């Protein structure tokens, strides 16, 4: 009879295992679309990223580097990201603990009163009448106490890789959070650098207006002298005075812009206002760095946003595998050992030592629908993660392509604009001489001054745009944050 029961038991277990094996499959990690091997720029601009571009090599302005240090120490967004890394690390450490058996120590005290017509009540009555027990072994029938002092342990055997994949998912999420911190750092540095160079640009713009105002004042003095001797009209004097006031107003407006940008920088660095120390140089294009061979694929996949999204993709696949493993039987082992007695006096007697070993095999049946939904969610999360990863690769490639092409264009524009300013500098001197000799009127003098100012402002604007383009180039190249 026992052999037959054992046979049926084994058949039942085997049937449950077979039922649990009808599980959905986890999709393999997709590969991003192949990055074009053609050059990303129309001319011979190339890059060599066998070694990443380093922060302190790319940005060598000491005042800007000091601001980078301040941002890392005090910016609240960066500090929040650091705390999220600690949270991800805690999840990772917790997942590692899942492989170890649990262990608890403690004590249990209880008291039961059994009715006369219960199995326990009759059993205790018969036990006390037995001649096989001593007086110490007799049970108190009114209140039957139970004392237990010991340890118990349980352990889930990771036969199907559920715990392993949960640990892998936690590890990849931790790595993704580290890359996410680098991304936030790069974005903060980019924002600080843009604001810093905007300040430098505004300082230069202020100098341009002030220098041109001096030239304008000189022309005004010439016209005023001409008016005094009757060689110029009052209209000419008023035109020059109006233009002077216009430029003075612009000077004050620039000062207001400087205050606003300084406030934005001090907010990012966690300071309560104050002046921002700065140099007087915009970031020039490093043509020597660009004139090297380029490995576009290496550049794209060295960026923290792309790396982070790939780690998330790997984590979602591990989550899907863990969800799939939940369909299989859960194998648990358990044990407890301790001192157990119905008498306090006998609790610490060696004869009170008791223990138990347990083994369990549990197969999900009625909650299989819930497991299917959990797996479907995990599978869709993996698909979303791949789309996000592919998007980041595409964005990184197009961003790099755009920046490099703009770099080439800016070099041409800056050359043309610099020449324009030189020509108009000469035109100012010529117009003053012509006006004094009567070969030019006051409107030509005003227009030459205005043209020179506009040309200098246009040149400055293109220099600033080129600087911003070069700041973004550091991010596009996946620059190394050598902090």
Image (cartoon, rainbow, N blue to C red):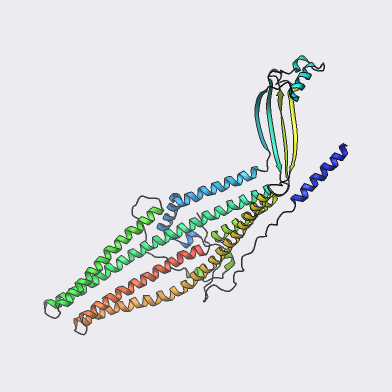
Residue 46 shown left or right of residue 144 in the figure: left
In percent of width and height, residue 248 lies at: 24, 66
Q: Can residue 377 be seen in this snapshot?
A: yes
In percent of width and height, residue 422 lies at: 33, 77
Q: Residue at x 48, y 56 (%)?
A: 185
Where on the picture, by quarter, is residue 261?
bottom left
Q: Residue furthest bottom?
A: 439
Q: Is residue 199 above or below residue 214?
A: above
Q: Residue furthest front?
A: 117
In percent of width and height, residue 24 lies at: 70, 56
Q: Residue at x 33, y 60 (%)?
A: 258
Q: Residue furthest left?
A: 229
Residue 281 shown left or right of residue 366 in the figure: left
Q: Can residue 276 be seen in this snapshot?
A: no
Q: Nearer the viewer, residue 382 or 199?
A: 382
Q: Residue at x 63, y 56 (%)?
A: 314
Q: Residue at x 37, y 76 (%)?
A: 417
Q: Nearer the viewer, residue 276 or 307?
A: 307
Residue 101 shown left or right of residue 17 in the figure: left
Q: Is residue 475 above or below residue 88?
A: below
Tell me how many marks there are: 0
Q: Quadrant of the N terminus?
A: top right
In percent of width and height, residue 129 lies at: 79, 16
């Amino acid at each position: 009879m026992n052999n037959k029961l054992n046979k049926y038991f084994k058949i039942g277990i085997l049937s449950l295992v077979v039922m649990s094996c009808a599980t959905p499959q986890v999709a393999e990690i997709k590969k991003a679309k192949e990055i074009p091997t053609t050059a990303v720029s129309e001319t011979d601009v190339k890059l060599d990223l066998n070694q990443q571009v380093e922060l302190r090599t790319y940005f060598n302005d000491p005042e800007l580097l000091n601001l980078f240090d301040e941002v890392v120490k005090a910016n609240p967004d960066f500090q929040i990201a650091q705390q999220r890394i600690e949270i991800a690390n805690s999840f990772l450490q917790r997942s590692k603990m899942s492989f170890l058996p649990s262990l608890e120590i403690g004590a249990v005290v209880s008291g039961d009163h059994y009715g006369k017509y219960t199995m326990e009540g009759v059993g205790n009555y018969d036990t006390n009448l037995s001649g096989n027990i001593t007086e110490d072994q007799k049970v108190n029938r009114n209140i039957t106490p139970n004392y237990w002092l010991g340890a118990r342990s349980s352990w889930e055997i990771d036969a199907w890789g559920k715990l392993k994949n949960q640990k892998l998912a936690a590890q990849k999420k931790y790595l993704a959070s580290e890359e996410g911190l680098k991304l936030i750092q790069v974005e903060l540095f980019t924002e600080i650098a843009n604001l810093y160079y905007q300040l430098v640009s505004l300082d230069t713009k202020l100098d341009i207006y002030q220098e041109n105002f001096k030239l304008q004042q000189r022309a005004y003095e010439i016209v005023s002298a001409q008016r005094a001797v009757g060689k110029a009209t009052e209209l000419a004097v008023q035109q020059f005075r109006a233009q002077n006031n216009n430029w003075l107003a612009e000077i004050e407006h620039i000062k207001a812009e400087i205050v606003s940008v300084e406030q934005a920088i001090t907010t990012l660095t966690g300071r309560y206002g104050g002046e921002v120390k700065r140099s007087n140089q915009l970031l020039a294009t490093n043509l020597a760095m660009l004139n090297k061979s380029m490995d576009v694929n290496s550049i794209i996949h060295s960026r923290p946003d792309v790396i982070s999204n790939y780690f998330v993709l790997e984590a979602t696949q591990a989550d899907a595998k863990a969800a799939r493993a939940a369909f299989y039987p859960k194998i648990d082992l358990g044990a407890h050992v301790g001192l157990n007695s119905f008498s306090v006096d006998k609790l610490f007697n060696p004869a009170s030592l008791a223990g138990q070993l347990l083994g369990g095999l549990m197969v999900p049946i009625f909650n299989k629908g819930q497991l299917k939904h959990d797996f479907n969610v995990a599978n869709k999360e993996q698909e979303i993660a791949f789309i996000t990863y592919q998007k980041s690769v595409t964005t990184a490639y197009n961003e790099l392509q755009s920046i490099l092409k703009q770099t080439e264009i800016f070099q041409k524009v800056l050359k043309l604009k610099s020449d324009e300013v030189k020509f108009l500098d000469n035109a100012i001197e010529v117009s003053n001489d012509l006006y004094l000799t009567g070969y030019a009127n006051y409107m030509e003098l005003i227009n030459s001054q205005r043209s020179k100012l506009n040309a200098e402002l246009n040149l400055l604007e293109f220099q600033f745009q080129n600087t911003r383009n070069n700041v973004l180039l550091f991010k596009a190249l996946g620059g190394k944050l050598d902090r």
